[in-house]
Image (spheres, rainbow, N blue to C red):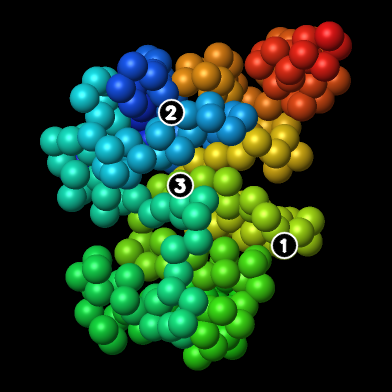
Amino acid sequence: MKSTPLTALDVSHVSHAYGPRKALDDVSLTVGTAAFCGLLGLNGAGKTTLFSLITRLFDNTSGQVRVMGHDVRRAPKLALQNLGVVFQSRTLDPDLTVMQNMTYHAALHGIARRDAHERAIAELARAGLKDRLNDTVRTLSGGQTRRVEIARALLHHPKLLLLDEPTVGLDVGARRDILSHVRTLVDDGGLSVLWATHLMEEIENEDAVVVLHQGKVIENGSASEIVARQNADSLKDAFNTLTGLAKDKAA
């Protein structure tokens, strides 16, 4: 019997370039099973490029990426079966109903129609949107749309969920609801999450954190450990020191 990997995601020595510009430089990080990990970085740090490599939108020609122990290059089907993703850009069809969006996505994963309908209802109920399944997406708020995208990403029962700046453009209440929902999925459902953000207030003291800056991992550990190592008052202050923003503001 094969044992469960200790890590849901293992990125080892991965680099990627767009022509002469290096977007990622020897990046390594891990996300534990049933854990929430924050990937912190400014715009242009390389977060989206990293997500594109993990999800196979781009091919990693250096290093190794494993999802639940499966190499995304050597065993892409097994790796992607364990992976759900919510990209920064909205990807639902606004003219279709919530249920139509869900079942269309399920069909792409080869899920039978009846099973897809049952899974969609279950995931929408967890997201607090069961009563909106027959409404068109364009009638939903920004926060509700995001929760539908999360529900859709979980239809095939992945073990790891990637979220790329999922709260961008949302008001404070919607951001709080999305974050609370995802943390509940981790705590109660055993899901592993890599949450990419530039918003420090979305990270809790004991969360695992990886700081990505100009394509390089410059710090990792729990949020409280990073704050202590930088002798800072908050994660935001520690991040500013690490990325040089503190010097820029002082200049």
> Does residue 159 sit above or below 115 in this rendering?
above
| CA gap, disc 1 and disc 2 | 28 Å
Q: Amino acid at mark 3?
A: Leu
| CA gap, disc 3 and disc 2 | 13 Å
Q: Quadrant of residue 138?
A: bottom right
Mark 2 burial class by Cα count in 10 Å: few <14, some 14-19, many 20+: many
In which quadrant will I find the C terminus?
A: top right
Q: Which residue is mark 3?
A: 162
Q: Amino acid at mark 1?
A: Ala
In depth, the one of 102 and 17 nearer the eye is 17
Identify which residue is drawn at 46% across, 52% down. Answer: 87
Total residue callouts: 3
Mark 3 or mark 2, whichever is nearer to me: 3
Q: Percent position (x, y) of residue 84? A: 39, 54
Q: Percent position (x, y) of residue 211? A: 58, 23
Mark 1 burial class by Cα count in 10 Å: few <14, some 14-19, many 20+: some
Say the numbered circle drawn on residue 94. Answer: none
Identify which residue is drawn at 40% across, 33% down. Answer: 50
Q: Which numbered disc flags the more N-terminal residue, 3 or 2?
A: 2
Tell me if 115 is positioned left or right of 151 in this view: left
> Does residue 205 sit above or below 229 in this rendering?
below
Q: Percent position (x, y) of residue 195? A: 55, 42
In depth, the one of 20 and 141 nearer the eye is 20
Can the viewer see residue 60 in this picture?
Answer: yes
Can the viewer see residue 204 in this picture?
Answer: no
Q: Amino acid at mark 2?
A: Thr
Q: Which residue is mark 2?
A: 30
Q: Quadrant of residue 74?
A: top left
- Tell me whether circle 1 and circle 2 mark residues in contact (CB < 8 Å): no
Tell me if 6 is positioned left or right of 231 in this view: left
